[in-house]
Image (tube, rainbow, N blue to C red):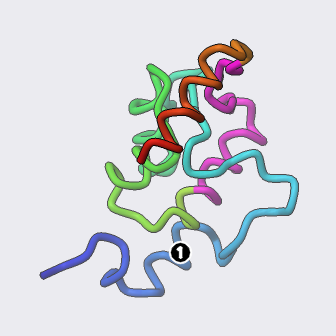
Amino acid sequence: MRRPGRDDAPDRLYTLTRGRSRTGPDSPFDLVTLVVAESEPVAGMQSEHAAILRMARFPASVAEIAAELGLPVGITRVLLCDLLAAGRVSARHPHRPAITDPDLLEQVLVGLRNL
């Protein structure tokens, strides 16, 4: 069985990222970061960058983009950093509502104790 990204020739992945294998420590991208395109693809753009912009017309996670491209997440993160630096995408983490209702938390605790 062929695994996307893992069986690709290493030189292809090296070429896609221009030799970069990691993002900087300040990279905002993790698996659940939502990516939104801020512009349309332009002529002459790297095909993977253009594909990301088309996928991110609506918010898409880094994991979804990597799966759709068939590339490892690390390589996808490098490509996303390129687009972010160019101002072509924005990145944000999904909003997680805080659970502040003490009654709900108490019910969860009672349920866990009953297990």
Q: Is residue 89 magenta?
A: yes
Up/down of 70 relative to 19, above or below: above
Helix, strand or loop at label 1? It is helix
Along the line of sight, the residue nearer the viewer: 31 or 108: 108
Residue 44 vertical position relative to residue 13 in the rendered view, above or below: above
Q: Which of 98 and 77 is in front in this view?
A: 98
Residue positioned most to the front: 114
Residue at far left of view: 1
Nearer to us in this view, 111 or 101: 111
Within the image, what quadrant is residue 34 found in?
top right
Name the quadrant containing residue 22: bottom right
Left or right: where 12 falls relative to 23: left
- In the image, residue 11 sits, relative to residue 104, either above or below, namely below
Where, quadrant-wise, is the N terminus in this rendering? bottom left
Relative vertical location of residue 14 with respect to residue 109 in this rendering, above or below: below
What residue lies at 60% left-to-right and 17% top-to-bottom? 104
Residue 43 visible here = no
Work out whether residue 87 or residue 24 is closer to the camera in this orientation and state it.
24
- Which residues make up the magenta segment? 77-99
**Which residue appears at 40% of the width and 64% of the height?**
71
User: Residue at left 29%, top 70%?
Assistant: 4
Residue 67 horizontal side relative to residue 93, left or right:
left
Residue 61 placed where, x, y %?
50, 39
**Residue named by callout 1:** 15
Q: Residue shown at 74%/30% (left/top)?
A: 87
Q: What kind of residue is marked 1?
A: Thr
Is 56 one of the magenta-colored residues? no
